[in-house]
Amino acid sequence: MPAAQIANVHHRHVVVAGVRVFYRESGSGEKGPTLLLLHGFPASSHQYRRLIDALGTSYHVIAPDYPGFGHTEAPAGFRYSFETLTDVVEGFVDGLGLRWIVPYMFDFGGPVGLRLAVRRPELIAGLVVQNANAYEEGLSELARSAVALRPGGDGAEEGARQLLTPAMTRSQYETGSHQPSLVSPDGWTLDQHFLDQPGRHAAQLALALDYHANVALYPQWQQWLRQHQPPTLVLWGRGDPIFLEPGARAYLRDLPEARLHLLDTGHFALEEGLPEIAPLVAGHLDALRPTRPALALAVIGASGQLGSGVVREATSRGHSVTPLGRDTVDVTDAASVAAAVAGHDAVVVSVKGPDRLVSRGAAAVLTGLERTGVRRLVFLGGGGTLESPSGGRYVDAPDFPNAYRETALDQAAALDLLRAADTPVRWTYLSPPPLHLVPGPKTGCYRTEARDTPLVGSDGDSRVSTGDYAAAVVDLLEGGAFPRQRVTVGY
């Protein structure tokens, strides 16, 4: 019997404007866009757990919890509205360096995802719409009564509180389902648990009384859909008592090429419709995978451990790679660099040596690239330049290994030079973990963020394999993310 392919799902946090956002992540983004799973009310990223299992071995899948939901922690005084939820999701996308996404929009995910699309159309590779309404005809009487609620309105808060009861939470899962035995009680039980946490009722009341702002934006969202024509898959549980089937069909007015699938289930369609939905979403993502044009890359320092790893990874993805070593280029001489890299799309630099080789090389490479018109550089820097929990750089700590201190200080000088440079070159300085860049193959489960502190895993350790480090370098070259920033990689 062949071994089953089962996704590894990571459970992580990232801080966005003071909000500690919890998210689930599986897979890597090298095969296509990231599927950004935007949950509904009163749920959390937990609602996507089985979809992540189904897709995470083949696609990059990320599911955050909004402020006021699930495991995400918002600071006291956070103002809950659909605009501020979108602010956090937008910051989340930018913080993780996602540059090409397919929002899967369910329920509240529609107002969040469509706001994000209007703000940042360049991010959107396509859409998956699942019981996320954007048209007046999709509003049931229950939905219209919720839309009518206004802050300070007579009985508005009392009406909104009715949406937070265990009976209402359970009914959203069960009403309209075709086979109730397929609907796990875990969903509504966990949702109610989070709803009843301190401060959550106030957050949900604020959002309920803000829902009318979404309907006011329907014309703007519809105009965006007509103008941009994103490739769209519409999935709809036709037994949904909140958002009605005509709301699904209405998308076809503005997106005549959209694919519509009506399912015999209710609002939380994934609960019993996963076997039908997962292949549809996979097919939609496959259709969005571009034929990525091959890049012409020059790798300076290609004979070293990291440089050779980048050469192998880039070549395996179909890119044209020119490996450059000391016999073909003097990294400290701008003219030599210009002659070696002219005609390439991007350059990777992975060097170290005595007599300030790294920082002198950074200066010469910038000048050489400017002369030739090459505008993309990924500079492989050091982990010693990262800041420790105490606030100082690792390289400045008394216990930092003396054997590596000179190189680490030189790498720090190179970073300072890049940050101070007034240059058209879109450089990215990539730091490995401060200690544990370990030999090993690519797993595809790494993450990359623009920050000056290490990325740590659930065990509190910061590490990455050389295979994943090389893959992160090629990701940066292909996606163009994090221009003029220092980033780091880890698990």
Image (tube, rainbow, N blue to C red):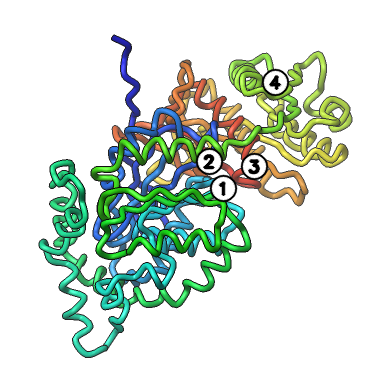
Sequence-wise first label, 2 or 3: 2
SS for dot 2: loop
Amino acid found under the numbered disc labelled 3: Gly
The image's mark for residue 36 is none
128 versus 33 height, above or below: below
Q: Where, by quadrant of the figure, is residue 460 drawn? A: top left
200 versus 276 height, above or below: below
| Residue in view at x 26 percent, y 69 percent | 203
Q: Nearer the viewer, residue 195 or 256?
A: 256
User: Which residue is label 4 attached to?
Assistant: 301
| In this view, the mark in front (2 or 3) | 2
Amino acid found under the numbered disc labelled 4: Gly
Q: CA distance from mark 4 to mark 3?
A: 21 Å
Q: Residues within 10 Å of mark 2 (few under 14, many from 20)?
A: many
User: Which residue is label 1 attached to?
Assistant: 125
Tell me, yes or no, whether the two marked residues, 1 and 2, touch with CB atoms within 8 Å: yes
Sequence-wise first label, 4 or 3: 4
User: Which residue is label 2 attached to?
Assistant: 33
Sequence-wise first label, 1 or 3: 1
Question: Residue 387 appears at what percent x and percent y?
Answer: 46, 42
Q: CA distance from mark 4 to mark 1?
A: 35 Å
Q: Residues within 10 Å of mark 3 (few under 14, many from 20)?
A: some
